[in-house]
Amino acid sequence: MIAGAHALVTGGSSGIGFAIAARLGEKGAKVTIWARGEDRLAAAAVALRADGVDVRHDSVDVTDPVAVEAAHDRAVAHHGPVDILVSSAGASHPGRFLELDDQIFRDMMEVDYFGTLHPIRVVAPGMAERGRGSIVGISSAAALLGIYGYTAYGAAKFAVRGLLEALRGELKPHGVDVTCVYPPDVDTPMLTAENAYKPAETAAISGTVAPISPDTVARGVVRAIEKGNSAVYSGIRLRALVALGPVINPFVERIFDRTVRTMHRQQSGRPGRGKLES
């Protein structure tokens, strides 16, 4: 039941998080949104209130477990126990493995994995004790199949997937649903920022499919919460990839490899040699 529930959405100031907060508010949930940037977060709260959403906002760094616990306590004091958690805060920094700094790998794990883990750690005990609740984490299509340029980001999102899939089995007996969401490219500020670092090969691989809207993901998430679904796959191509699984993956990998070889020929004339420009 979403109406009257307290929904906590991390990364709620823009993109997928904001769209999910809006949809949950539309369904009658009391909403708390978290993000790091105070100005954009406050503007998001104003926009949600204008649409009739009962929302409060709090500037929180989800990579800091102490800050997360304190913000959770403030949210509970205002709206009551968290019934729905949507952990949507994330970041993406693509790049070729041989060129990425070690810090990028650490940053992706901190934001995408630990930024998902910390909020879950503070809400899950209460949900289990009450015997109800819904936890949603945003992974990525890059957690379904390895993609050129996503060794840092993809690994972090694979970790999110592993966490949520294992957690689903542990919390189900306690009446708590756990959902993992696998969006492809989504038309968000994060995608715009990501494109500044995206290798040409990665852009060529993903460029054949137009980004979907944040609201498309949000509608799928709300349906999953209502039905207790364990996974959300956005888009027909992604659902086909999942349905066919190991049968189609080798063919997809060959397409990716052919795309990379073509890019190498176009840019350097010597496949596999030299440093390509993004």
Image (cartoon, rainbow, N blue to C red):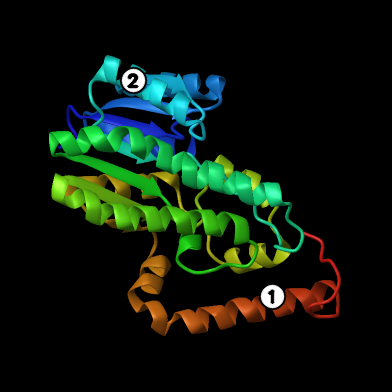
Is residue 10 toward the left or the right of residue 105 in the image?
left
Q: Compared with residue 9, is residue 213 higher up or lower down, i.e. above or below?
A: below
Do the residues under discs 1 and 2 have CB atoms within 8 angstroms? no
The kind of residue on which mark 2 rests is Asp
Q: Considering the image in quadrants, where does the C terminus appear?
A: bottom right
Q: Please give the residue where the numbered disc 1 appears in the rendered image.
A: 260
Give the percent coordinates (x, y) of residue 242.
37, 71
Q: Secondary structure at mark 1?
A: helix
What residue lies at 40% left-to-right and 27% top-to-bottom?
A: 33
Q: Considering the image in quadrants, where does the N terminus appear?
A: top left
In this orientation, does residue 88 appear? no
Give how far apart the Cα atoms at labels 1 and 2 are: 49 Å
Give the label, 1 or 2, closer to the camera: 2
Numbered disc total: 2
Give the percent coordinates (x, y) of residue 196.
71, 48
What residue lies at 37% left-to-right and 33% top-to-bottom?
A: 9
The kind of residue on which mark 1 rests is Val
Is residue 32 toward the left or the right of residue 267 in the image?
left
The image quarter containing residue 18 is top left
What residue lies at 75% left-to-right and 63% top-to-bottom?
A: 98
The numbered mark at residue 73 is: 2
128 and 237: which one is in front?
128
Upstream in the sequence, badge 1 or badge 2? 2
